[in-house]
Image: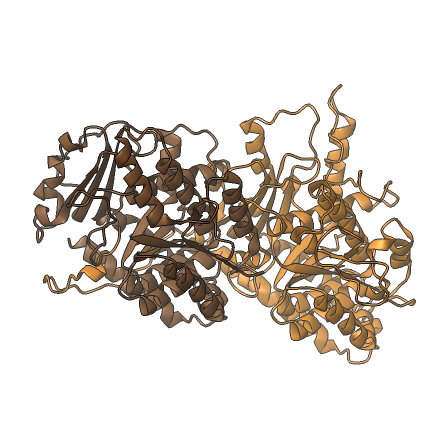
């Protein structure tokens, strides 16, 4: 089995990361009843003998002594990381895994990318190398960050290039929080577009998420839970937004609930690689199946269920509802309209007691309402993992490579252009060494090219699917030609 | 005459387990419907074919388990051990940490060569354990990366090193929709390569077996476990010992290609159904058919329907193309059972469909970068398309 390392950058990245580790511990605690350090846990955690000083403390088998997260925490302000280190998760992180500064990036991509990038390059590389060394077989880096600020956006994308150069065989999966239109950081469009160029060029796979969608999901859940009919309560630990049962005891911050959704996304994404099932899906299969062309690697995710009611007895109808929900906009982590756009590929990652016939029945049911690109009419990838998430009997994560991401990017580009035309706030960027206007124009071109790719695909949307002429073979009919060797199909 | 089984990838290993389990269960079945001496001869023959003996009497499957990541093999080993009735050899597995990522190129060009020595070594050790070795049974899927890519690579190696032994590949044809997105690419690459090195390709389509579970067996929530068990049952009824012409049990060695055939199932029916001859001429033309009958009344069963010349291609006499093997000992819990193994045009449509879909995808160049990354170029794809179009054409012209 392989290991993954999480690199959490900036305030947002670290807050989400913290929720992730919390939930990961909870999940493994629920599954691993005997306290033995097994391969599933080792995918995200090291087992360390805390009595040993220095580096030699790793234990590869046997009882769990002390679990350390395979994580690197980076922030150019100390606030968030300090809070983590003083909180209930402090023992999960190794102090040697942190890189912090005090001044912050001032919501400026250029400061994050160029100033801090060059300042901390060696340190970051060293920490990354160390965490890779602790892995038997490192498969994937998960980078968590936001696009709108300075550190997550700038420094977060700086290290993408570094990872590509230093660890070319290891996948780079990026979870990016995109700014909503009402974002309070004025320069977020600049930061996002500059970051997008890096994502285009150096990420294997990006999961774009926007705050608005997360917020909408929470509102919907609150509505459901609070206006619940008498006697209907939500099953404990089943709220996808909750961390009950985990180490953190209260929602101290308003973003906790939203961050938990993203944390659940990452857990579900990796579940089939960590746990057993009748149809496994490793992380390298995500990119293999969902990325038909290298630049089109943006995947829209949707997660269901969001909660489970206590008085539940799951009939097949409820199971089918789960599949329908996954294709409803209410469950998406990005505001987009996949049903009216073109699917390039779709993956269904199912957890729990769900069998292949359930999946097939639902694919048949949902297929007619979805449009798939002509060369991939049957483009579904399925995985069945036997272990459900905590608090649920089953769950579904749908990942779609769909042209519906185009509007998000176009909107971002428009917001960018509104600022750029007036050269608003540009001087903050240009005064950073190495930054020129060409950085901006190149970034916009990169995004425009991407949008154009999606446009071309969309243009094929309503065209009838035609089979292309096949190779034609000339056959000379004589019995000498039909040798036993060529007719072997049994 | 022993058979060494090579189980590759998740599918191969999951099915392999069910096959050995089915073989041994049947072997120990108390409803053999024959005399004790015959039953014992049957059991001994089955044992020799598929199992080797251990000190404490627990039979060990003559199998090599290969996978590029550990979860499935671990599960398979423990399931076998838990049954208490048989197990896999302790050192019979080859496992790595990171899977093939559904990438045929990665399986064939990276994992294959990298681990060639270790895998072939394990196989060789298993072959050496056989007193009288007859051939290989390789279980693999076409849709993924390990079974398909490494399966093709290993079969090629077996062709080089054991050219005189039979190599039969059990291939799992994926569902039309919804297993792996690049399954059509992986399939055509696998098939075109296997064509050059395998002696016989036994095909089972997931869609067909799924239908059996749904329609014939009325299973409501069909799992892969159900599917694999049906498959194992079919394979068991084909591979268990049968009388040879000299009326003693022995496994038949098959001449190249023509003798073995498989078509979606007839086995498991409680009575031997008469094959209803379609009076209009739209049925699959065969080049060979084998019927295996087990159980009660085998000697009196009427198989004349299978000898109808209309079933066969014009350049074959039915007497050269049809064989029937009869064994009194019943299979599993069925008083009577029949299996039809057929080499006919049945696969033309599915094959044509897969080639068509792969071709459409190839024309757009989608996913090709994932293969060229590991050394499988567009020319390799074109070669595969060419050889498979030839196969389709050959079968169509029967």
Along the horizontal axis of the image, is A235 left or right of B235? right
Q: Is residue B334 left or right of residue B248?
A: right
Q: Looking at the colours in the rendered structure, which chain would you say is drawn in orange? A: A
Q: Is residue A309 above or below residue B340?
A: above
How many numbered tags mark residues here? 0
Closer to the camera, B302 or A362?
B302
Position of residue A326 in the picture relative to residue B32 (left or right): right
Quadrant location of the N terminus of chain A in the rendered image? bottom right
Q: Is residue A341 visible?
A: no
The answer to whether residue A148 is left or right of residue B56 is right
Q: Nearer the viewer, residue B157 or A3?
A: B157
The colour scheme used to paint the residues is: by chain
Residue B257 spot, x, y in % from top left: 22, 56
- Can see residue A289? yes
Q: Position of residue A403 (x, y in %)?
A: 56, 54
Which residue corresponds to the image point at 26% horizontal and 64% vertical from the top-left? B164
Q: Residue at x 20, y 51 (%)?
A: B259
Looking at the image, residue B311 lies above or below residue B201: above
- The percent coordinates of residue B88 (x first, y second) are 47, 50
Compared with A425, B31 (above or below) is above
On the image, which quarter does residue A169 sit in?
bottom right
Residue at the extreme top of the image, as rendered: A230
Outermost residue toward the bottom in this view: A434
- Where A230 sits versus A131, above or below? above
- Image coordinates of residue A438 in percent, x first then y, are 70, 77
Quarter assignment of residue A425: bottom right
Q: Colour of chain B?
A: brown
């Amino acid at each position: 089995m392989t290991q993954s390392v999480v690199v959490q950058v900036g305030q947002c990245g670290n807050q989400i990361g913290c929720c992730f580790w919390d939930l990961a511990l909870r999940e493994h605690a629920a599954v691993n009843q005997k306290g033995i350090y097994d391969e599933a846990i080792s995918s995200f955690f090291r087992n360390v003998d805390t009595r040993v000083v220095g580096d030699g403390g790793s234990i590869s088998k046997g009882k769990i002594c002390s679990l350390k997260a395979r994580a690197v925490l980076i922030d150019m302000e100390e606030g968030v990381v300090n809070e983590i280190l003083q909180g209930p998760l402090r023992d999960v992180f190794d102090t040697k895994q942190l890189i912090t500064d005090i001044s912050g990036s001032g919501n400026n991509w250029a400061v994050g990318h160029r100033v801090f990038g060059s300042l901390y390059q060696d340190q970051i590389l060293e920490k990354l190398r160390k965490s890779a060394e602790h892995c038997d077989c490192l498969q994937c880096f998960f980078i968590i960050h936001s696009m709108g600020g300075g550190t997550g956006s700038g420094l977060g994308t700086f290290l993408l290039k570094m990872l590509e150069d230093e660890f070319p065989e290891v996948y780079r999966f990026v979870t990016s929080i995109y700014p909503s239109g009402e974002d309070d950081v004025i320069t977020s469009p600049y930061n996002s577009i500059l970051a997008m160029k890096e994502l285009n060029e150096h990420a294997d796979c990006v999961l774009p998420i926007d705050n608005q969608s997360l917020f909408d999901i929470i509102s919907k859940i609150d509505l459901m839970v609070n206006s619940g009919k008498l006697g209907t309560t939500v099953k404990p630990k089943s709220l996808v937004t909750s961390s009950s049962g985990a180490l953190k005891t209260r929602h101290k911050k308003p973003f906790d609930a939203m961050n938990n959704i993203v944390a659940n996304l990452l857990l579900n994404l990796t579940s089939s690689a960590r746990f057993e099932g009748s149809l496994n899906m490793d992380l390298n299969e995500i990119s293999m199946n969902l990325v038909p062309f290298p630049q089109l690697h943006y995947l829209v995710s949707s997660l269901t269920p969001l909660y489970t009611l206590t008085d539940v007895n799951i009939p097949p109808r409820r199971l089918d509802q789960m599949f329908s929900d996954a294709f409803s906009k209410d469950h998406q982590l990005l505001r987009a309209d996949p049903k009216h756009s073109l699917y390039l590929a779709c993956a269904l990652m199912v957890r729990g007691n769900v069998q292949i016939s359930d999946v097939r029945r639902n694919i048949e049911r949902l297929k007619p309402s979805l449009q798939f690109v002509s060369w991939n009419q049957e483009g579904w990838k399925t995985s069945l993992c036997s272990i459900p998430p905590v608090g649920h009997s089953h769950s579904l994560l749908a990942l779609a490579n769909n042209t519906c991401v185009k509007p998000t990017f176009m909107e971002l580009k428009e917001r960018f252009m509104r600022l750029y035309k007036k050269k608003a706030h540009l001087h903050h960027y240009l005064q950073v060494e190495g930054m020129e206007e060409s950085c901006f124009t190149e970034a916009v071109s990169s995004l425009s090219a991407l949008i154009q790719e999606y446009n071309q695909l969309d243009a094929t949307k309503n065209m009838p699917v035609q089979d292309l002429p096949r190779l034609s073979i000339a056959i000379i009919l004589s019995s000498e030609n039909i040798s036993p060797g060529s007719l072997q199909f049994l | 005459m022993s058979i060494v089984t090579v189980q590759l990838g998740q599918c191969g290993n999951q099915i392999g387990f069910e096959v050995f389990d089915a073989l041994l269960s049947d072997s120990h079945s108390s409803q053999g419907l024959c005399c004790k001496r015959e039953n014992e001869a049957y059991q001994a023959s089955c044992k020799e074919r598929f199992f080797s003996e251990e000190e404490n009497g627990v039979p060990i499957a003559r199998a090599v388990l290969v996978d590029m990541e550990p979860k499935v093999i671990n599960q398979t080993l423990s399931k076998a051990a838990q049954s208490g009735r048989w197990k896999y050899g302790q050192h019979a597995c080859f496992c790595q940490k990171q899977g093939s990522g559904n990438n045929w190129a990665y399986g064939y060009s990276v994992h294959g060569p990298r681990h060639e020595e270790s895998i072939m070594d394990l196989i060789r050790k298993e072959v050496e354990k056989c007193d009288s070795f007859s051939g290989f049974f390789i279980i693999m899927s076409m849709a993924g990366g390990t079974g398909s890519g490494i399966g093709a690579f290993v079969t090629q190696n077996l062709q080089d090193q054991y050219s005189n032994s039979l190599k039969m590949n059990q291939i799992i044809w994926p569902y039309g929709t919804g297993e792996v997105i690049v399954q059509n690419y992986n399939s055509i690459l696998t098939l075109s390569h296997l064509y050059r090195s395998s002696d016989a390709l036994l095909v089972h389509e997931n869609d067909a077996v799924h239908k059996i579970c749904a329609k014939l067996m009325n299973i409501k929530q069909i799992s892969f476990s159900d599917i694999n068990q049906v498959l194992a049952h079919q394979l068991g009824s084909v591979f268990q010992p049968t009388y040879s012409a000299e009326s003693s049990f022995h496994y038949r060695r098959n001449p190249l290609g023509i003798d073995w055939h498989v078509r979606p199932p007839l086995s498991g029916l409680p009575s031997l159904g008469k094959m209803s001859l379609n009076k209009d001429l739209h049925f699959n033309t065969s080049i060979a058919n084998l019927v295996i009958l087990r159980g009660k009344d085998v000697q009196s069963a009427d198989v004349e329907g299978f000898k109808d010349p209309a079933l066969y291609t014009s350049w074959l006499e039915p007497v050269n193309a049809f064989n029937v093997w009869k064994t009194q000992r019943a299979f599993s819990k069925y008083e009577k059972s029949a299996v039809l193994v057929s080499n006919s045009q049945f696969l033309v449509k599915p094959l044509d469909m897969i080639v068509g879909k792969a071709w459409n995808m190839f024309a757009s160049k989608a996913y090709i970068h994932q293969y060229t990354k590991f050394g499988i170029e567009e020319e390799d794809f074109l070669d595969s398309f060419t050889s498979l179009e030839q196969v389709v054409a050959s079968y169509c012209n029967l």
